[in-house]
């Protein structure tokens, strides 16, 4: 995956990059953000996970690559280092998003990260084929600090997405 991301970053010329995934509905307000600093990785905090079979919606503070925006040059540096280290030592399933773990704590770099909040939420559609684990209860988290500001709802509660069928 790191190699695929790096190939894409090297092929593009745009100075600002928004990471996107196929199973997330991005509200147009997500793309209004402009990063303040060139060496910080930013994550949209306004994202709800939605279960595809019943529309149950869940919010908690987290940083996910699918919500990341940063300057291309910072991303190139980050992903070149990730590819290099993976080729030397193999992949370790740390799942650390850029800027969320220092090298002292098992991460790939000492980069910084921050949040931004789009006007309307993005929807992370959770289905059987989702690669990352879906946790629907706070007690399913080993570390409770990773699921702060927990909110539960339903897809119909998210007014920007009323009438959307995620199945």
Image (cartoon, grey):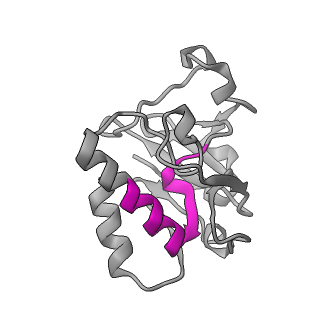
Q: Is residue 145 magenta?
A: no
Q: Position of residue 102 (x, y in %)?
A: 58, 41
- Taking the image as drawn, is residue 81 in sight? yes
Looking at the image, which is closer to me, 21 or 127? 21
110 relative to 167 in the view: left or right:
right
The correct choice, above or below, for 22 with respect to 143 in the image is: below
Based on the displayed image, in which of its 4 quarters is residue 144 positioned?
top right
Prevailing secondary structure of the magenta residues: helix
Looking at the image, which is closer to me, 127 or 68? 68
Q: Position of residue 43 (x, y in %)?
A: 62, 55
Looking at the image, which is closer to me, 165 or 14? 14
Q: Position of residue 10 (x, y in %)?
A: 35, 76
Q: Position of residue 132 (x, y in %)?
A: 40, 36
Looking at the image, which is closer to me, 52 or 126? 126
Q: Is residue 76 magenta?
A: yes
- The region drawn magenta spans 63-81
């Amino acid at each position: 995956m790191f190699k695929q991301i790096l190939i894409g970053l090297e092929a593009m010329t745009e100075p600002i990059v928004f990471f996107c995934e196929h199973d997330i509905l991005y509200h147009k307000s997500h793309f209004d953000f402009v990063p303040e600093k060139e060496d910080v990785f930013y994550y949209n905090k306004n994202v709800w996970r939605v279960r595809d079979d019943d529309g149950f919606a869940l919010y908690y503070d987290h940083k996910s690559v699918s919500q990341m925006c940063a300057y291309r040059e910072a991303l190139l540096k980050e992903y070149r280092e990730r590819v290099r280290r993976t080729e030397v030592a193999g992949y370790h399933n740390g799942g650390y998003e850029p800027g969320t773990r220092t090298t002292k704590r098992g991460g790939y770099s000492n980069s910084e990260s921050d949040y931004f909040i789009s006007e309307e939420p993005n929807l992370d559609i959770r289905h059987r084929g989702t690669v990352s684990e879906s946790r629907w209860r706070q007690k399913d988290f080993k570390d409770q600090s990773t699921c702060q500001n927990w909110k539960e709802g339903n897809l119909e509660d998210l007014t920007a997405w009323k009438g959307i069928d995620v199945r």
